Image (cartoon, helix red, strand yellow):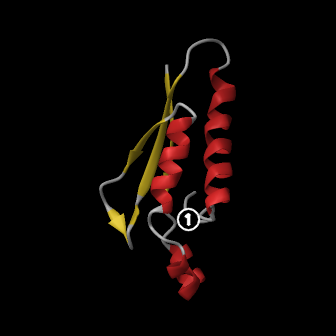
Amino acid sequence: MKLYHQFDLRNDIFKSLGRDFFEVPPYVVEDLVKNMSGKGYTILKSSANYMGFPKSITVVKEFTGPFVGQFTAKIKDDFRNISKKLGISELFE
């Protein structure tokens, strides 16, 4: 069974960050993808971009067994933890 979770870019965060937004380089999304891939996830980035950031990131993981429900929460936790370390946790929901 393939589990996935889509994280959408929050356009409203750009207004609230103001000039601080420009301190976040777009390559941190590549670091996020690399770190999530290192944990065994398949990452799909939207081809549509806004201010250099993909409009959505989909995280996919192949699971089997009775614990599939628990891994859905793990996908979200891993994404949040890695994006928090990179300083972009508020960009995606």
Residue in the picture at 53% in, 52% down: 32
* Residue in front for this viewpoint, 79 or 15: 79
Residue in the picture at 61% in, 11% down: 65
Residue 21 versus residue 72 in the image, above or below: below
Left or right of residue 69, residue 56 in this image: left
Image coordinates of residue 15 in percent, x first then y, are 53, 82
Image coordinates of residue 34 in percent, x first then y, are 49, 45
Which residue type carries mark 1?
A: Leu
* Residue in front for this viewpoint, 41 or 66: 41
The residue furthest left is: 47
Q: Secondary structure at mark 1?
A: loop
Label 1 neighbour load within 10 Å: few <14, some 14-19, many 20+ = some
The residue furthest bottom is: 19
Which quarter of the picture shows residue 77?
top right
The residue furthest top is: 65
Residue in the picture at 57% in, 57% down: 93
Image coordinates of residue 1 in percent, x first then y, are 49, 19
Which quarter of the picture shows residue 86?
bottom right
Residue in the picture at 67% in, 35% down: 74
Residue 49 versus residue 75 in the image, above or below: below
Left or right of residue 70, residue 36 in this image: left
Residue position for label 1? 91
Q: How many marks?
A: 1
